[in-house]
Image (spheres, rainbow, N blue to C red):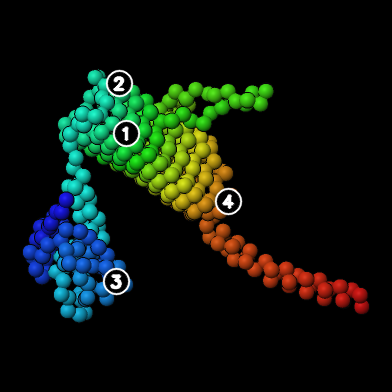
Amino acid sequence: MKVEFTAAQIAALLGGKVEGNAEAKVWNVARIEDGAPGMLSFLANPKYIQYLYNTQSSIVLVNEDFEPSEPVTTTMIRVKNAYESFAQLLAIYQEYTNNKVGISENASISSDAEYGENCYIGDFAFIGERVKIGKGVKIYPLCYVGDDVVIGDNTVLYPGVKLYAMTHIGKNCIVHAGAVLGADGFGFVPQPDGTFKKIPQIGNVLVGDNVEIGANTTIDRSTIESTKIHDGVKLDNLIQIAHNVEVGENTAMAAQSGVAGSAHIGKNCIVAGQVGISGHISVADRTTIGPQAGLTRGVDESGKSIIGSPAYDYSKFMKDVVRQRNLDKLENRIAELEKKLNDLLSK
């Protein structure tokens, strides 16, 4: 579906000011260096200024204090922050184009399930018993929503999402394709004969408001009580959150990271890709954890940056890396000193 917007309409949405043709139309977006007629671009980074003077994009968002040094042929819209305004437009466009409503006749919905107005439930989605679904929720085809699940207003479940029984998800969340919430935690007791006895996992998963969960990410139910993902958390694709874990508000975690059972991660933390966090440890608020780090013990002081495996202070780690690269030179120097010392002793 092709949806067109004029410069005047976009400026009205963003509270911006048009310079050029107010009737210029766009129907898609492009990087400023790859612009074409009908495309909308933005200029926020000064190193891309040269592209503004020959871009083919029909409209370019610029900061309101931008002063061009050459003539500009495209239509500009001046806004307070070009990058944020561009993101705002993308969100508006996505909401407009993904505004699906309606219940598929091919969906399987239990008779005692409840759902609010303006919902979308796609083909072959399964909605279990006593499920409560808020207003404006979108459940795409082939999703599984188990018994006693609660889903808040305006949350989106993309195709193939699996919500085990008793999972609770807040408002305005996004769960991407293939994510599994509420599977059993990995709990087993070794037996004398070498086998393992399963520990029943009878808790659930609680997800707060404004959370985004990436494709094929898994969040296990707790043994008892709840695995908790607090408001504003952003989880990338292919992340494993084990049972009884708690992730604090507005923490972001990149792909292929894993958190072992009963670990507690604080608020506003940044966890880079392929990080491993051991179980039963706590990470203080505003901790930044570098890529491929391994945390075997907790972080007590807030605001620290750590990296390495086992992880420790970022600045010390970088100094150690430099020393490691010079080990061969140090070895040669030691060998020379030993030779000189032996020569002196022999005399």
Label ID, residue 129: 2
Instruction: State the separation of the CA atoms marked 4 and 2.
Output: 46 Å
The nearer-to-camera label among 3 and 4 is 3
The three-letter amino acid code for the residue at tag 1 is: Cys
Q: Nearer the viewer, residue 347 or 9?
A: 9
**Which residue does the numbered mark 1 point to in the structure image?**
143
Instruction: State the separation of the CA atoms marked 1 and 2.
Output: 15 Å
**Which residue does the numbered mark 3 point to in the structure image?**
48
**Residue 276: where, in percent of width, then height?**
52, 45
Image check: 122 left or right of 228? left
Which is nearer the N-term, disc 3 or disc 4?
3
Which is nearer the N-term, disc 3 or disc 1?
3
Instruction: State the separation of the CA atoms marked 3 and 2.
Output: 55 Å
Q: Residues within 10 Å of mark 1 (few under 14, many from 20)?
A: many
* Image quadrant containing the C terminus: bottom right
Q: Is residue 48 above or below residue 219?
A: below
Image check: 136 left or right of 207? left
Q: Is residue 15 above or below residue 331?
A: above
Residue at position x 25%, y 33% in the image? 123
Which is nearer the N-term, disc 3 or disc 2?
3
Instruction: State the separation of the CA atoms marked 4 and 1.
Output: 38 Å
Assess whether mark 1 and mark 4 are in contact (beta carbons under 8 angstroms): no
The three-letter amino acid code for the residue at tag 2 is: Glu
The three-letter amino acid code for the residue at tag 4 is: Ser
Determine if residue 171 is in view: no
**Residue lying farthest front?**
106
**Which residue does the numbered mark 4 point to in the structure image?**
309
Q: Nearer the viewer, residue 180 or 241?
A: 180
Q: Quadrant of residue 214?
A: top left
Q: Under tag 3, what secondary structure?
A: helix
